[in-house]
Image: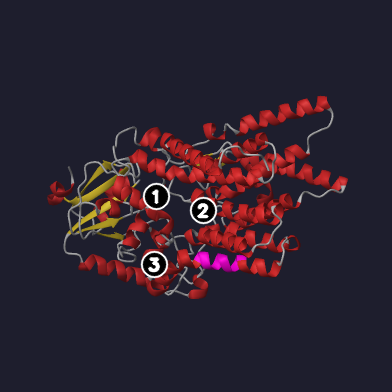
Amino acid sequence: MIENKIKPFVLFLLFLVCGGVISIALKFEHMWDFANYHYYNPWAFLNNRVNYDIAVAGINAYYSPFADIPLYYLIKYFNDYPNLIYFAQGLWFGALGFVMFKVSELFFADVRKVLFALLLGLSGYAVFFQIGTSTNEIMLSCFVMLSLYLLLREIFILRQGRYRIFLLAGLIAGVALGLKLTSIIYVLPLGLSLICFAKNIPHPTKNIGIFVLGGLIGFLLIDGIWLWKMQVLFGNPFFPFLNKFFQSEYFEIRNYTDERFLPKSLADALLLPFHWAFNTFRADGNTIAVDFRWAVLFVLAFIAAGRLFYKKEKPKAETAFLIVFTLLSYCFWIKLFAIGRYMVVLELCSAILAVKAIVYLLPRREKVKTVYWQVVSALFFVAMLTPIFSQIWGCRNCVVDNNMFSQFVAVDGVKIPDNTLLMFYNYPSAALLPYFSGTADNIRGVSIKQKNYLTADGETDVFNAIPKWKKAKEDALNSHKGLRVAVFAVEDEETIEALLKTDDLLKGMVCKRKRSNIIPSYHFCVAADKQSEIFK
């Protein structure tokens, strides 16, 4: 560990401020998921509207809303001050930087190596392009990395086995899982890594058991009420997941998974880092990512492992623990999701391991050492270019907003009256409900058609194929006596014109395209004699 002359609390505040300022500068929050459910879900939960609006965010409408509640309240009370919201959202990045710094301190006594690992980790594609966004991956990673830090410090640095630390680490990991179930790719490897290193833990059975207990408590404290709500509404606490087991009538009897980005073979899985290095297109984000660091890490790991084997050496216990945790997390990630934005913790841990490998492979001969550091410096410089040359997922400060809107969330030229039914014809549109609810009472949303969530055959809208959803939609449409407004998101004019002629719900309606900083624009359609009520 390095000798830190700055008090931890002061350092923590510095990281927080830096994270907030960077977030203000980037203004990255302009994402499909925010328009679809990150803004809608907490509003629906807090206003007791879960399943009152009918599938307006698709399957995502039934994801736990708790991680999104802070951003929802920020928008509710400070929508006219977008930079304040960006700053607050960036605090999570600052907190992650601080935890990463503390974890790195456990591995390096030289502050230069700590900073090297810190810069390498925080400039990764998954980390950098989620600064200030509503994806919550950086938030979750703060909890996972903090749990990892507590375990590493307790087991390998302090060499103690205090049960309260294992309980706290478990609670924190459980909170991450409760906030978002995708954290399973890190929480489960934490527990498995503890089992692998049980010999290093005093009273291993007791302490590992306490860690598991803490994880369960943390998970239920955060997500328990949501699990109960899903059970009451749909007969499946994890709705729509694991439905082959729970068999809710609101979904197909299958275990829903998103398999679009999973490797098709073992070879694809093993070669994925090299595929990323030479093919910059990332299908999971539909963006360009110039980031070769995973390929370099694999090469470094292979060479370092060969040297360890040849010299019959072993890495230090804490390094071995981090290697096992990272490998297990990578395996779970590639098996379950293979989605880039879930890789934040992997990017941070791999940065530490990369620096460890670089130091371990340092040649002894001075001339060779000079060339070695030149190559390392060049690779590090290129790695730092990832945020510059990669494509941004969603940026209001780039081309969408262009200082057009003075609010964090805004739609130009539309006023939704009280007692209006919004009929959504595709996603992402659910964010319009909490936005318009600020000036209109008794509004409701119904998903009419969508192309994102299909039945197992890959052809039919799941919310029109399942009888329970069809009846819920019919009831909502038949019971509403007020104004109806149809909404299209990111749809071409030709498709809308065709639907106006063939869809009974749309006949006699007139559509207008309106600008928004939720997504670039929406088309709003209303009966011709009602245009003056909504269009400004």
The magenta span reads 211-219
Circle 1 sits in a helix, a strand or a loop, which is it?
helix
Q: How is the image coloured?
A: secondary structure
Numbered label attached to residue 465:
3
Q: Position of residue 259 (x, y in %)?
A: 55, 57
Q: Which residue is mark 1?
A: 34
Relative to 275, does residue 152 appear above or below in the rendering? below
Q: Which residue is mark 2?
A: 140
- Residue drawn 47% across and 66% down? 221
Which mark is in front, 1 or 3? 1
- Residue drawn 57% across and 52% down? 146
**Residue sitting farthest toward the right:** 311
| Total labels drawn | 3
Which quarter of the figure is the C terminus placed in? Answer: top left
Relative to 3, does residue 254 appear above or below in the rendering? below
**Where on the picture, by quarter, is residue 122?**
top right
Residue 403 in view here:
yes
Q: Are marks 1 and 3 in contact (CB under 8 Å)?
A: no
**Where on the picture, by quarter, is residue 493?**
top left
- The kind of residue tagged 1 is Phe
* Separation of residues labelled 3 and 2 (CA atoms): 35 Å
Numbered label attached to residue 403:
none
Q: Does the magenta stretch mainly form a helix, a strand or a loop?
A: helix
Q: Position of residue 457 (x, y in %)?
A: 48, 63
Q: Is residue 321 left or right of residue 423?
A: right
Which mark is in front, 3 or 2? 2
Q: Residues within 10 Å of mark 1 (few under 14, many from 20)?
A: many
Give the mark, 1 or 3, whose residue is nearer the N terminus.
1
Which quarter of the figure is the N terminus placed in? Answer: top right
Q: Reply yes or no: does residue 135 show up in magenta.
A: no
